[in-house]
Image (cartoon, helix red, strand yellow):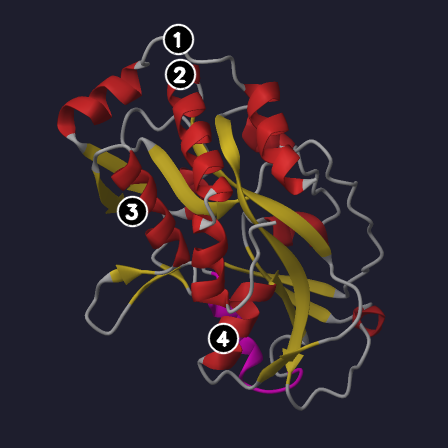
Amino acid sequence: MKLALIGALAAVLLAPAVHAGETLDRVNSTKVLKVATNAGWPPQSFLDDSNQLVGFDIDVANEIAKRLGATAEFDTPEWGVMTGGRWGGRWDVAVGSITPTKPRSEVLDFAGIYYYTPYVFAVHKDSTLTDPKELNGKRIGVETATTSEEYVNRSLVIDAPGVPPVEYWLEPGEVKTYADSMLPFDDLRLGDGVRVDAVISGEQTVLGAINNGYPIKILSGEYAFQEPLAIVADKGDAEWTSKLGETIAAMKADGTLSQLTTKWYGKDYSE
């Protein structure tokens, strides 16, 4: 079903490309793919000990650039800027694990789904909570301007064919927002209930934090929600977005996305 989702998304949003669009012309001419991504979201994208940008999204962007005969050139704008559209030519593509939501569809084109992530509830390892439903009335930490924040505020609407509506049951006592994906975990690691009782984030991010020594755990049971993640372009260049969609579909079909998700997450999240 999810392989069909890639094609369905492209079919719904894009017309078939006949001539190269302005962006593709520029990439073909300069041999440079200008990529917007994140700088502090391991294992998706982060700075390693050598101050080099690495991660799953970085590998995906480099592979897209390679298949387009270009070299990826990375920039790390604020999340709200990257997902706000109207880039003015600053970037050709955003590879930042972006969820296709209805508000974003008004300013961005979704080139294709390249992997999926379940969102989970993380608590301190000393927490006595065992069921996500016990989080009602608790202090919940989320990164601002993300689907986690939209979910906790009951405003999340994922705009992709075949994705079921989000079910809301969580009634937090307080929501604390953070400007960076790892900041909620920095508060959570201080102790059970010291600043927050739980954090809602992608399973991959939580597992990455655990692997990096954060004293946290995932509450077993139901996910908060499961989301598709899209590679996006600024709105208005259908030929370019179609070309990106073709590239993503090829990476899906030949197993590249399966290999890259397994490399970075230890599990195939590509379908």
Q: Which residue is mark 1?
A: 18
**140 in relation to 6, above or below:** below
Residue 129 location in percent, x, y? Answer: 78, 82
Q: Which residue is mark 3?
A: 62
Q: Distance from label 1 to label 2 (Cα)? A: 7 Å
- Asked whether disc 3 touches disc 1, contact meaning CB atoms under 8 Å apart, the reply is no
Badge 1 density bin: few <14, some 14–19, many ≥20, Cα 10 Å? few
Q: Which residue is mark 2?
A: 239
The amino acid at mark 2 is Glu
The amino acid at mark 3 is Asn
Looking at marks 3 and 1 on the same chain, the residue that comes earlier in the sequence is marked by 1
**186 in relation to 66, above or below:** below
The amino acid at mark 4 is Ala
Q: Distance from label 3 to label 4 (Cα)? A: 24 Å
Q: Residue at x 34, y 53 (%)?
A: 59
Q: Residue at x 48, y 68 (%)?
A: 183
Q: Quadrant of residue 131?
A: bottom right
Q: Look at the image and give the residue range highlighted in magenta.
A: 181-193
**112 in relation to 77, above or below:** above
Left or right of 187 on screen, residue 77: left
> Which of these two is toward me, 225 or 177?
225
Question: The N terminus is located in which quarter?
Answer: top right
Looking at marks 3 and 4 on the same chain, the residue that comes earlier in the sequence is marked by 3
Badge 2 density bin: few <14, some 14–19, many ≥20, Cα 10 Å? many
Badge 4 density bin: few <14, some 14–19, many ≥20, Cα 10 Å? many
Extreme residue in the left direction = 30
Instruction: Name the front one of labels 2 and 4.
Output: 2
